[in-house]
Amino acid sequence: MVPIILTLLLSWNLIVGSRGFKNSFGVTSRKTRHNEWEIISRFAATARLDTDSVNSGIEFPPPLTPIQRTTRAIEFYKRVLPVLAAYKAKEFELRIRRETMREEIDEMAEERIWKDLDEWGSTRVAETIQEMKGFYVKTGQVISTRVDLFPEAYTSKLQQLQDGLEPMPFELVEKVVSQELLDGAPLSELFATFDQKPLGAASIAQVHRATLLDGRVVAVKLQRPNVEPKLQGDVANLKRISKALAKSLPVDYYTVFCELGDALTNELNFLAEAQAMKKIDLAISHEVDGQKSKRPVTIPLPIGELVSQRVLVMDFVEGVPLNKLQQTMKEKGIEPGTPEAKIAGRRILESLSMAFGRMIFGAGFIHGDPHPGNIFIGDGGKVSLIDCGQFKALPRPQRVQLAELVLAVREYQRSSDKELPESKKELVRLVRKFGVKVREDREQDDNLWCSVALFLFGDADQKLPGGYSSNELDDESPIKLVTSFPQEFVLLGRATVLLKGIAKKLDVPFSLANKWADGCLLSKDTASNPTLPLWGKETTQVSQSSEGGEIKEKVRFKQVTKVLKDWGRGKKSRFLERSVKKLPPRWKNKVLEYKLRQEEKKDDTAK
């Protein structure tokens, strides 16, 4: 219990091991709302959407000074350290009662003690994070998604950090959009309607539904005016502390926070996000070998040039966030654990794993923030991946290295007892080659190097060699013994572990190595033939020849047949789904149970 809470409370240790996980939704406290109203009060009365012009500008605050950053850090620890002290005191009390007073404490009684303490501690921590916001919101979001690691009291209370709470006043929304997109003109110059109530309000931005003058329904994302200084200040704090204490810390957190700082800079620039949306869409719409294919997930795209550094107009996405899917399914009479729920979970995970496989091993351009609040599920299990503010580009040599590592993980998991030593030796070689470093006293421990690879890319139920634990907060977790990850591994490792976490939450057996094996083989096979990036090809499909005529890309017969096959499979699938829905409950369950068994059998065959 204590190691879990310790990780929760120390913000630079809160990034769960050394992967530097970082999410993008949060909340706004009363204090933030007060600050926003202070911004509004500097200007003239707010203009209305259908009448007045908006002429006043919005001031975006400057970065925090070193003194302000230090004050924030002290305030955070002042609030949360008493929680840590309470857990340590309770642990000491229980030990005294058992060892000195010879008191017998049954398991249920001890569980109640810890549950009461979890309730108190989680309330205090959640309130602190909501009050202080900034990067502390990001770290709290990690906890809320890890139901496999943290007490229910913490995950449930911090769940609200994934949801929208207390939005910016609409008067401020109007001013920001007007200033960024319309040079001070009223919103009616661009929008026929603009919903005052946001679809979601997060720590960095909030999103509104609107209708353009041409009738298209869009989502408008705008940044909070006072958020950037706190976020950048908190990360600067973490970088300064981790660098100063580098020799005392077990992990190279400075590298992690440098990566997070770069990702945060991109996330605060909506122009970079708009470009990333287009690249990620191209990545998932092509196979690893570059052949165009049906998209496994939907990426909302920017609308024309309606984007600035702080406002982004994009496609509107229908659906339910993954973190609310179970509740929605229950409302429709679909209980967790039933064949229907498991089949839906498999489809979601299949779509996500295919999309990330194409991003990583094909285009080498990765969505870096796949937490449940950024994954929307629409009708028929259609998956949409939103919020492309965090991303990572992987050069070709690193994609090939990664492909080799994933294939080696699959080979290890398939190995017989006789083949295991050789498979382990290959895994150790590849992890070392990638630049991972471990504690000096464990450098010769092949089991540790092997466990690092299996932790990231192995099956969820894969036993780690050498007695290492797959629980990343356990003292024997291989991740706790890693002192340095290459920066490329930070967001990538986060994506893989979160995919495995989603599988656990949906109760779906999942093997990354098996899902990505074909893409890894293709990535290796095409490594010696560098090609133009997908975003370069897209813009040159119709170009001018030297004589002034048009050169159009030829449509290949293979592409046509593939499109027809995809269309046929989709048509058949939709027909079967409609037919199954019309069956009586008893027969419907039998059909779904049969389908689930077939899918499980297919997975077993692939292993």
Image: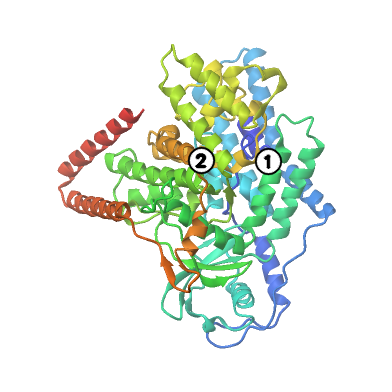
Q: Is residue 278 left or right of residue 260?
A: left
The answer to whether residue 137 is seen in the rendering is yes
Q: Residue furthest bottom?
A: 51
Numbered mark located on residue 256 in the image = 1
How packed mark 1 is, by other alpha carbons closer than 10 Å (few <14, some 14-19, many 20 or more), is: many
Residue 542, percent from left and from top? 44, 67
Numbered mark located on residue 527 in the image = 2
Q: Is residue 237 left or right of residue 277?
A: right
Specify which label sits upstream in the sequence, 2 or 1: 1
Residue 298, percent from left and from top? 42, 56
The answer to whether residue 129 is seen in the rendering is no
Q: Residue at x 44, y 32 (%)?
A: 513
Circles 2 and 1 in contact, beta carbons < 8 Å: no
Q: Residue at x 50, y 16 (%)?
A: 422
**Quick one: 82 or 525, which is closer to the camera?**
525
- Up-down relation of residue 529 to residue 34 (above or below): above
The amino acid at mark 2 is Ala
**Quick one: 557 or 261, which is closer to the camera?**
557
